[in-house]
Image (spheres, helix red, strand yellow):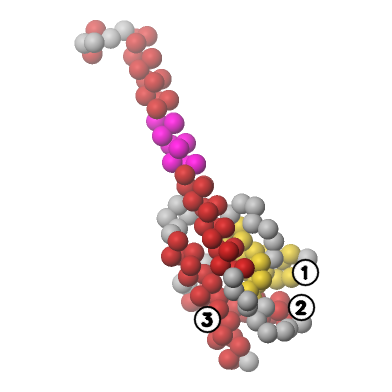
Amino acid sequence: MNPIEISPEQFKSLCEQFLAIAIDYLLAAFRKSIENDLQHAQRLGSAIEETPDLQLMAPIELSAVCFRYVGSMHTEDNLNRLNSEILRRLVERGNVYLSNATLQSRFCLRACVVNHRTTDSDIDRVVAEVLAVAKEVSNAN
């Protein structure tokens, strides 16, 4: 096909085909990114469940992971204050970013995995950072 002799209808058809291919490619990349986020959330959940000082607070259905540090026996009020202080210090340190959630009046640490650049090692650092900060907070008290 000579590009000079292409009809408007043929040009439109080629554009539509190109657009369909581009959309398929972008959707596949988007799906893969979401799948990775969901796998990272499950990975973090497994690490939390394997760590006696941490407690998973809700089932992981998407990419949000709610958990808390429980350490040795504490009252609910103390756990809420402790986890609030852990979150404050985590944010201050800047090595991992967590937010919070309150579930059934319990202050929780909340990780939400939504960055396509997140790696397994990023996820693995979360538990280590939480435990390190919890130790700092405990030593300060």
Q: In the visual, does 7 lie left or right of 16?
A: left
Q: Is residue 51 above or below residue 25?
A: below
Mark 3 or mark 2: which comes first in sequence? 2
**Residue type at mark 3?**
Ala
**Residue occupying the point 69% across, 61% down:** 58
Magenta-highlighted residues? 22-31
- Residue linked to disc 3: 132
- What kind of element bears circle 3? helix
Place of residue 87 in the rendered image (x, y in percent of width and height, measured from the top left) = 59, 74
Q: Amino acid at mark 1?
A: Ser
Residue under pointer 1: 105
Cα distance, mark 3 to mark 2? 21 Å
Q: Please report the residue visible at 66 percent of the width from the left and 67 percent of the height from the top.
A: 56
**Above or below — where is 75 with respect to 42?**
below
Give the crowd class for mark 1: few <14, some 14-19, many >=20 residues within 10 Å.
few
The CA distance from mark 1 to mark 3 is 25 Å
Distance in Å between CA atoms under marks 2 and 1: 9 Å
**Residue 68 appears left or right of 118:** right
Task: Between residue 59 and residue 107, name the one nearer to us.
Answer: 59
Q: Which residue is mark 2?
A: 76
Q: Is the residue under label 1 in contact with that under label 2 (CB below 8 Å)?
A: yes
